[in-house]
Image (cartoon, rainbow, N blue to C red):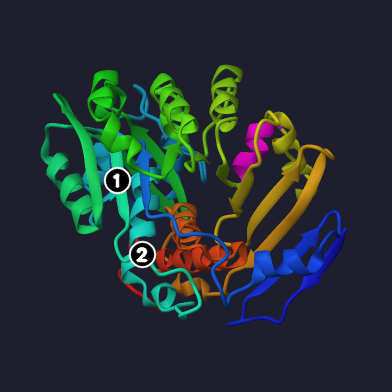
Amino acid sequence: MKYFHSTPIDNYNFSFSNIFNQNLKYQSNFYFNDDNKIRPEINSIIGIGDCIVDIITEINENIIAQYKLEKDKTKYVNENNRNIFDEYDKMSFVRYVVGGSIQNILKSLSFSLYQNPYLNNFNNNSNNINIIENYKISMLGCVGADIYKEKIINSLNQSRIGPILEITNGETSRCAAGFYNKKPYLISEIKSSKKLDKEFIISNKDKILNHKILLIEGYYIQYQFEICKELCELFQKEQNKLIILILNNIELNQYLGEKFVIISNYADIIFSSLSQVEEFINLKGGIEKQKIFEKLFQKLSDNKKRLLVIKDGKDESYCVSYDYTRRHLEYILTCFPQKIKSEEIIDEIGVEDAFFGGFLAGYMKGFSLYTCLKKGNDVANITLKNMGCTFETKK
Protein backbone atom coordinates (compact mmCIF):
# COMPACT_ATOMS: atom_id res chain seq x y z
CA MET A 1 0.00 0.00 0.00
CA LYS A 2 1.34 3.42 -0.94
CA TYR A 3 0.50 6.73 0.68
CA PHE A 4 0.36 10.07 -1.13
CA HIS A 5 0.57 13.23 0.93
CA SER A 6 -0.35 16.64 -0.44
CA THR A 7 0.82 19.97 0.87
CA PRO A 8 -1.32 20.89 3.89
CA ILE A 9 -3.94 23.54 3.13
CA ASP A 10 -5.41 25.65 5.95
CA ASN A 11 -3.58 23.45 8.49
CA TYR A 12 -5.35 20.32 7.25
CA ASN A 13 -3.52 17.02 7.09
CA PHE A 14 -4.75 14.40 4.69
CA SER A 15 -3.51 11.28 2.92
CA PHE A 16 -4.46 9.02 0.07
CA SER A 17 -3.91 5.28 0.16
CA ASN A 18 -4.09 3.72 -3.31
CA ILE A 19 -4.35 -0.03 -3.09
CA PHE A 20 -3.69 -0.78 -6.75
CA ASN A 21 -1.51 2.17 -7.76
CA GLN A 22 -3.32 2.56 -11.10
CA ASN A 23 -3.71 5.76 -13.12
CA LEU A 24 -2.33 7.92 -10.33
CA LYS A 25 -2.66 11.22 -12.18
CA TYR A 26 -6.38 10.70 -12.80
CA GLN A 27 -7.03 9.49 -9.27
CA SER A 28 -5.12 12.37 -7.75
CA ASN A 29 -7.17 14.88 -9.74
CA PHE A 30 -10.41 13.08 -9.06
CA TYR A 31 -10.03 12.82 -5.32
CA PHE A 32 -8.03 15.95 -4.42
CA ASN A 33 -8.67 18.62 -7.05
CA ASP A 34 -10.04 21.78 -5.45
CA ASP A 35 -10.04 23.96 -8.58
CA ASN A 36 -12.91 22.40 -10.53
CA LYS A 37 -16.04 20.43 -9.97
CA ILE A 38 -15.72 16.80 -10.99
CA ARG A 39 -19.39 15.80 -11.37
CA PRO A 40 -22.72 17.47 -12.12
CA GLU A 41 -24.46 19.08 -9.20
CA ILE A 42 -27.39 17.37 -7.50
CA ASN A 43 -30.18 19.70 -6.54
CA SER A 44 -32.55 17.66 -4.37
CA ILE A 45 -32.56 15.27 -1.41
CA ILE A 46 -35.22 13.77 0.83
CA GLY A 47 -34.47 12.24 4.21
CA ILE A 48 -36.65 9.76 6.08
CA GLY A 49 -36.32 9.22 9.80
CA ASP A 50 -37.31 10.22 13.30
CA CYS A 51 -38.70 13.68 13.92
CA ILE A 52 -37.32 14.23 17.41
CA VAL A 53 -36.88 17.01 19.92
CA ASP A 54 -33.60 16.73 21.85
CA ILE A 55 -33.67 17.69 25.53
CA ILE A 56 -30.03 18.63 26.09
CA THR A 57 -28.26 19.17 29.39
CA GLU A 58 -24.99 18.39 31.12
CA ILE A 59 -25.17 15.35 33.39
CA ASN A 60 -23.02 13.72 36.05
CA GLU A 61 -21.77 10.24 36.88
CA ASN A 62 -24.73 9.57 39.18
CA ILE A 63 -27.23 9.95 36.34
CA ILE A 64 -25.08 7.77 34.06
CA ALA A 65 -25.02 5.02 36.70
CA GLN A 66 -28.69 5.39 37.70
CA TYR A 67 -30.02 5.07 34.15
CA LYS A 68 -27.25 2.77 32.87
CA LEU A 69 -26.28 5.16 30.09
CA GLU A 70 -23.50 4.35 27.62
CA LYS A 71 -21.18 6.83 25.97
CA ASP A 72 -21.86 7.42 22.25
CA LYS A 73 -24.76 4.93 22.27
CA THR A 74 -28.49 5.48 21.90
CA LYS A 75 -30.67 3.54 24.31
CA TYR A 76 -34.46 3.43 24.39
CA VAL A 77 -37.04 4.13 27.02
CA ASN A 78 -38.16 1.34 29.31
CA GLU A 79 -39.86 1.18 32.70
CA ASN A 80 -36.52 1.62 34.47
CA ASN A 81 -35.34 4.80 32.75
CA ARG A 82 -38.52 6.66 31.80
CA ASN A 83 -38.12 9.15 34.66
CA ILE A 84 -35.00 10.61 33.06
CA PHE A 85 -37.11 13.07 31.05
CA ASP A 86 -38.71 14.50 34.21
CA GLU A 87 -35.27 14.77 35.75
CA TYR A 88 -33.87 16.66 32.75
CA ASP A 89 -36.87 19.00 32.69
CA LYS A 90 -36.08 20.10 36.25
CA MET A 91 -32.40 20.84 35.67
CA SER A 92 -31.21 24.41 36.01
CA PHE A 93 -29.87 24.59 32.47
CA VAL A 94 -31.67 22.56 29.82
CA ARG A 95 -32.19 23.27 26.13
CA TYR A 96 -34.86 21.95 23.77
CA VAL A 97 -33.49 21.55 20.23
CA VAL A 98 -35.04 20.02 17.14
CA GLY A 99 -32.70 17.10 16.60
CA GLY A 100 -32.38 13.44 15.83
CA SER A 101 -29.86 12.15 13.33
CA ILE A 102 -31.81 12.76 10.12
CA GLN A 103 -32.90 16.29 11.06
CA ASN A 104 -29.36 17.12 12.23
CA ILE A 105 -27.90 16.02 8.90
CA LEU A 106 -30.47 17.92 6.84
CA LYS A 107 -30.03 21.07 8.96
CA SER A 108 -26.25 20.80 8.61
CA LEU A 109 -26.62 20.30 4.86
CA SER A 110 -28.84 23.37 4.55
CA PHE A 111 -26.49 25.44 6.71
CA SER A 112 -23.58 24.44 4.49
CA LEU A 113 -25.41 25.17 1.24
CA TYR A 114 -27.04 28.45 2.20
CA GLN A 115 -25.51 30.00 5.32
CA ASN A 116 -21.86 28.99 5.50
CA PRO A 117 -19.88 31.48 3.38
CA TYR A 118 -16.68 29.46 3.71
CA LEU A 119 -18.29 26.70 1.68
CA ASN A 120 -20.47 28.83 -0.61
CA ASN A 121 -17.60 31.05 -1.76
CA PHE A 122 -15.31 28.10 -2.35
CA ASN A 123 -14.60 27.06 -5.93
CA ASN A 124 -16.93 29.44 -7.71
CA ASN A 125 -15.11 30.05 -10.97
CA SER A 126 -16.49 30.48 -14.46
CA ASN A 127 -15.02 27.20 -15.76
CA ASN A 128 -17.25 25.11 -13.56
CA ILE A 129 -20.78 23.85 -13.89
CA ASN A 130 -23.14 26.65 -12.89
CA ILE A 131 -23.92 26.61 -9.19
CA ILE A 132 -27.51 25.71 -8.46
CA GLU A 133 -29.04 28.52 -6.43
CA ASN A 134 -32.04 26.63 -5.14
CA TYR A 135 -31.77 23.20 -3.59
CA LYS A 136 -34.76 21.09 -2.64
CA ILE A 137 -34.27 19.53 0.80
CA SER A 138 -37.22 17.62 2.28
CA MET A 139 -37.93 15.73 5.49
CA LEU A 140 -40.26 12.72 5.45
CA GLY A 141 -41.58 11.52 8.79
CA CYS A 142 -44.31 11.66 11.38
CA VAL A 143 -45.04 13.98 14.32
CA GLY A 144 -47.68 14.03 17.01
CA ALA A 145 -50.36 16.67 17.40
CA ASP A 146 -48.67 18.22 20.45
CA ILE A 147 -46.56 21.21 21.51
CA TYR A 148 -43.49 19.88 19.67
CA LYS A 149 -45.19 19.66 16.27
CA GLU A 150 -44.99 23.38 15.47
CA LYS A 151 -41.46 23.58 16.86
CA ILE A 152 -40.30 20.91 14.41
CA ILE A 153 -42.19 22.32 11.43
CA ASN A 154 -40.97 25.87 12.12
CA SER A 155 -37.39 24.68 12.55
CA LEU A 156 -37.50 22.79 9.25
CA ASN A 157 -38.99 25.74 7.41
CA GLN A 158 -36.41 28.14 8.87
CA SER A 159 -33.68 25.76 7.66
CA ARG A 160 -35.19 25.68 4.13
CA ILE A 161 -36.22 22.06 4.61
CA GLY A 162 -39.63 21.18 3.24
CA PRO A 163 -41.67 19.13 5.73
CA ILE A 164 -43.53 16.13 4.29
CA LEU A 165 -44.91 15.06 7.64
CA GLU A 166 -47.82 12.90 8.65
CA ILE A 167 -49.49 14.30 11.78
CA THR A 168 -51.02 11.74 14.09
CA ASN A 169 -52.70 11.69 17.45
CA GLY A 170 -50.30 11.27 20.31
CA GLU A 171 -46.91 12.68 21.16
CA THR A 172 -43.85 13.56 19.13
CA SER A 173 -40.69 11.52 19.73
CA ARG A 174 -38.05 12.95 22.04
CA CYS A 175 -34.51 12.22 23.19
CA ALA A 176 -32.84 12.80 26.54
CA ALA A 177 -29.51 14.02 25.18
CA GLY A 178 -27.18 14.33 28.13
CA PHE A 179 -23.47 14.98 27.88
CA TYR A 180 -20.70 14.23 30.35
CA ASN A 181 -17.07 15.17 29.74
CA LYS A 182 -18.44 16.45 26.38
CA LYS A 183 -19.49 12.92 25.30
CA PRO A 184 -23.15 12.14 24.44
CA TYR A 185 -25.31 9.74 26.47
CA LEU A 186 -28.69 9.31 24.77
CA ILE A 187 -32.08 7.81 25.63
CA SER A 188 -34.79 8.09 22.99
CA GLU A 189 -38.53 7.77 23.45
CA ILE A 190 -39.95 6.92 20.03
CA LYS A 191 -43.66 7.68 19.79
CA SER A 192 -45.22 9.17 16.66
CA SER A 193 -42.20 8.24 14.50
CA LYS A 194 -43.44 4.65 14.49
CA LYS A 195 -46.81 5.68 13.08
CA LEU A 196 -45.79 6.78 9.60
CA ASP A 197 -48.34 5.04 7.42
CA LYS A 198 -47.79 3.34 4.08
CA GLU A 199 -50.87 5.13 2.71
CA PHE A 200 -49.21 8.47 3.49
CA ILE A 201 -46.18 7.36 1.46
CA ILE A 202 -48.38 6.31 -1.46
CA SER A 203 -50.32 9.59 -1.44
CA ASN A 204 -47.04 11.53 -1.51
CA LYS A 205 -45.19 9.21 -3.92
CA ASP A 206 -44.76 11.85 -6.64
CA LYS A 207 -43.38 14.38 -4.15
CA ILE A 208 -40.97 11.82 -2.74
CA LEU A 209 -39.69 10.64 -6.12
CA ASN A 210 -39.18 14.23 -7.21
CA HIS A 211 -35.80 14.11 -5.43
CA LYS A 212 -32.44 12.83 -6.64
CA ILE A 213 -31.18 11.46 -3.31
CA LEU A 214 -32.95 9.28 -0.73
CA LEU A 215 -31.30 9.53 2.71
CA ILE A 216 -32.34 6.85 5.20
CA GLU A 217 -31.72 7.05 8.93
CA GLY A 218 -30.52 3.74 10.37
CA TYR A 219 -32.55 4.20 13.55
CA TYR A 220 -35.70 4.16 11.44
CA ILE A 221 -35.01 0.68 10.11
CA GLN A 222 -35.83 -0.72 13.55
CA TYR A 223 -39.56 0.02 13.30
CA GLN A 224 -40.20 1.15 9.71
CA PHE A 225 -38.17 -1.45 7.83
CA GLU A 226 -40.81 -2.23 5.20
CA ILE A 227 -41.35 1.44 4.34
CA CYS A 228 -37.57 1.98 4.04
CA LYS A 229 -37.23 -1.09 1.83
CA GLU A 230 -40.10 -0.06 -0.45
CA LEU A 231 -38.67 3.45 -0.83
CA CYS A 232 -35.29 1.95 -1.74
CA GLU A 233 -36.96 -0.20 -4.40
CA LEU A 234 -38.77 2.83 -5.82
CA PHE A 235 -35.59 4.91 -6.02
CA GLN A 236 -33.53 2.04 -7.39
CA LYS A 237 -35.91 1.72 -10.35
CA GLU A 238 -35.34 5.37 -11.27
CA GLN A 239 -32.30 6.48 -13.29
CA ASN A 240 -29.70 8.90 -11.90
CA LYS A 241 -30.86 8.63 -8.30
CA LEU A 242 -28.78 7.84 -5.22
CA ILE A 243 -29.61 6.00 -2.00
CA ILE A 244 -27.64 6.89 1.13
CA LEU A 245 -27.88 4.96 4.40
CA ILE A 246 -26.74 6.21 7.81
CA LEU A 247 -25.45 3.41 10.04
CA ASN A 248 -26.36 5.03 13.35
CA ASN A 249 -24.89 3.93 16.67
CA ILE A 250 -27.28 1.11 17.57
CA GLU A 251 -26.74 -2.23 19.26
CA LEU A 252 -27.37 -4.77 16.51
CA ASN A 253 -28.78 -8.18 17.31
CA GLN A 254 -28.92 -10.80 14.57
CA TYR A 255 -32.46 -9.89 13.50
CA LEU A 256 -31.79 -6.15 13.27
CA GLY A 257 -28.37 -6.75 11.73
CA GLU A 258 -30.01 -8.68 8.88
CA LYS A 259 -32.34 -5.73 8.22
CA PHE A 260 -29.37 -3.38 8.09
CA VAL A 261 -27.63 -5.62 5.56
CA ILE A 262 -30.72 -5.64 3.33
CA ILE A 263 -30.99 -1.84 3.28
CA SER A 264 -27.21 -1.45 2.98
CA ASN A 265 -27.30 -3.51 -0.21
CA TYR A 266 -29.48 -0.82 -1.80
CA ALA A 267 -27.13 1.99 -0.75
CA ASP A 268 -24.77 3.83 -3.10
CA ILE A 269 -23.19 5.65 -0.14
CA ILE A 270 -23.01 4.52 3.48
CA PHE A 271 -22.40 7.01 6.31
CA SER A 272 -21.13 5.65 9.61
CA SER A 273 -19.02 6.23 12.66
CA LEU A 274 -15.96 4.00 12.97
CA SER A 275 -17.38 2.34 16.10
CA GLN A 276 -20.63 1.48 14.31
CA VAL A 277 -18.78 -0.12 11.41
CA GLU A 278 -17.16 -2.36 14.02
CA GLU A 279 -20.59 -3.09 15.50
CA PHE A 280 -21.99 -3.83 12.05
CA ILE A 281 -19.31 -6.38 11.18
CA ASN A 282 -19.12 -7.69 14.77
CA LEU A 283 -15.38 -7.15 14.88
CA LYS A 284 -13.79 -5.14 17.67
CA GLY A 285 -10.48 -4.64 19.40
CA GLY A 286 -7.13 -3.79 17.86
CA ILE A 287 -8.05 -4.46 14.23
CA GLU A 288 -6.42 -2.18 11.66
CA LYS A 289 -8.78 0.13 9.81
CA GLN A 290 -8.07 -1.39 6.39
CA LYS A 291 -9.32 -4.77 7.62
CA ILE A 292 -12.41 -3.19 9.22
CA PHE A 293 -13.35 -1.45 5.97
CA GLU A 294 -12.78 -4.61 3.92
CA LYS A 295 -15.02 -6.64 6.22
CA LEU A 296 -17.89 -4.20 5.82
CA PHE A 297 -17.78 -4.30 2.02
CA GLN A 298 -17.42 -8.08 2.02
CA LYS A 299 -20.54 -8.39 4.16
CA LEU A 300 -22.60 -6.72 1.42
CA SER A 301 -23.59 -7.88 -2.03
CA ASP A 302 -21.46 -6.98 -5.05
CA ASN A 303 -24.40 -5.67 -7.11
CA LYS A 304 -23.23 -2.06 -7.16
CA LYS A 305 -20.34 0.32 -6.58
CA ARG A 306 -20.44 1.84 -3.08
CA LEU A 307 -18.73 4.61 -1.20
CA LEU A 308 -18.16 4.32 2.55
CA VAL A 309 -17.90 7.65 4.39
CA ILE A 310 -16.76 7.53 8.02
CA LYS A 311 -16.33 10.11 10.76
CA ASP A 312 -14.43 9.05 13.88
CA GLY A 313 -15.98 11.34 16.49
CA LYS A 314 -14.30 14.74 16.51
CA ASP A 315 -11.22 13.24 14.85
CA GLU A 316 -10.37 12.11 11.32
CA SER A 317 -12.75 11.22 8.52
CA TYR A 318 -12.49 8.71 5.67
CA CYS A 319 -13.79 7.90 2.19
CA VAL A 320 -13.33 4.27 1.21
CA SER A 321 -14.11 2.35 -1.98
CA TYR A 322 -13.95 -1.37 -2.72
CA ASP A 323 -13.33 -3.27 -5.95
CA TYR A 324 -15.62 -6.31 -5.89
CA THR A 325 -14.00 -7.73 -9.02
CA ARG A 326 -10.55 -7.92 -7.42
CA ARG A 327 -11.94 -8.38 -3.91
CA HIS A 328 -9.99 -5.68 -2.15
CA LEU A 329 -9.99 -1.97 -1.40
CA GLU A 330 -9.43 0.54 -4.17
CA TYR A 331 -8.49 3.44 -1.90
CA ILE A 332 -8.75 4.97 1.55
CA LEU A 333 -8.86 8.76 1.57
CA THR A 334 -8.25 10.31 5.00
CA CYS A 335 -8.78 13.90 6.13
CA PHE A 336 -7.88 15.28 9.55
CA PRO A 337 -9.86 18.30 10.82
CA GLN A 338 -8.36 21.52 12.03
CA LYS A 339 -7.55 21.24 15.71
CA ILE A 340 -9.70 23.24 18.08
CA LYS A 341 -8.91 23.84 21.72
CA SER A 342 -10.48 21.46 24.21
CA GLU A 343 -11.92 24.35 26.22
CA GLU A 344 -13.79 25.53 23.10
CA ILE A 345 -15.70 22.26 22.82
CA ILE A 346 -19.08 22.21 24.57
CA ASP A 347 -20.26 18.73 23.62
CA GLU A 348 -20.01 16.13 20.86
CA ILE A 349 -23.76 15.64 20.43
CA GLY A 350 -24.52 15.42 16.70
CA VAL A 351 -20.92 15.97 15.61
CA GLU A 352 -21.01 13.06 13.15
CA ASP A 353 -24.41 14.17 11.83
CA ALA A 354 -22.99 17.65 11.23
CA PHE A 355 -20.04 16.12 9.40
CA PHE A 356 -22.30 14.08 7.11
CA GLY A 357 -24.38 17.19 6.35
CA GLY A 358 -21.26 19.15 5.42
CA PHE A 359 -19.96 16.25 3.33
CA LEU A 360 -23.29 16.06 1.49
CA ALA A 361 -23.16 19.77 0.69
CA GLY A 362 -19.82 19.32 -1.04
CA TYR A 363 -21.00 16.16 -2.78
CA MET A 364 -24.20 17.79 -4.08
CA LYS A 365 -22.16 20.74 -5.34
CA GLY A 366 -19.96 18.33 -7.31
CA PHE A 367 -16.69 18.84 -5.43
CA SER A 368 -13.89 16.29 -5.04
CA LEU A 369 -14.13 13.74 -2.25
CA TYR A 370 -11.29 15.45 -0.42
CA THR A 371 -13.22 18.73 -0.47
CA CYS A 372 -16.34 16.92 0.77
CA LEU A 373 -14.40 15.49 3.71
CA LYS A 374 -12.87 18.86 4.46
CA LYS A 375 -16.22 20.66 4.43
CA GLY A 376 -17.72 17.97 6.60
CA ASN A 377 -14.97 18.51 9.15
CA ASP A 378 -15.56 22.28 9.01
CA VAL A 379 -19.24 21.93 9.89
CA ALA A 380 -18.50 19.34 12.59
CA ASN A 381 -16.06 21.76 14.24
CA ILE A 382 -18.72 24.46 14.33
CA THR A 383 -21.19 22.24 16.18
CA LEU A 384 -18.52 21.17 18.67
CA LYS A 385 -18.50 24.78 19.89
CA ASN A 386 -22.28 24.77 20.44
CA MET A 387 -24.76 22.79 22.50
CA GLY A 388 -26.16 20.02 20.35
CA CYS A 389 -26.10 20.13 16.57
CA THR A 390 -26.49 23.91 16.23
CA PHE A 391 -24.60 26.63 14.39
CA GLU A 392 -24.53 29.75 16.51
CA THR A 393 -20.89 30.49 15.83
CA LYS A 394 -18.92 30.40 12.56
CA LYS A 395 -15.48 30.59 14.08
Query: Residue at coordinates 27% horizontally, 37% vertically from top-left?
Result: 207
Query: Residue at coordinates 31% horizontally, 36% vertically from top-left?
Result: 208
Mark 1 neighbour class, 10 Å CA radius: few under 14, some 14 to 19, many 20 or more: many
Which of pointers 1 and 2 lies earlier in the amino acid sequence? Answer: 2
Q: Main secondary structure of the magenta part?
A: helix
Image-based side of 106 in relation to 203, left or right: right
Which range of residues does the magenta coloring cover? 275-282
Q: Amino acid at mark 2?
A: Ile
Instruction: Measuring from the top left, give residue 164's x and y in whole percent.
Output: 23, 38
Residue 138: numbered disc: 1
Identify which residue, 393 or 371, lies in the foreground: 371
Q: Determine which residue is flagged by label 2.
A: 132
**Picture quadrant where residue 318 is located:** bottom right
Gap between marks 1 and 2 measured at Cα: 17 Å
Secondary element type, mark 2? loop
Q: How many marks?
A: 2
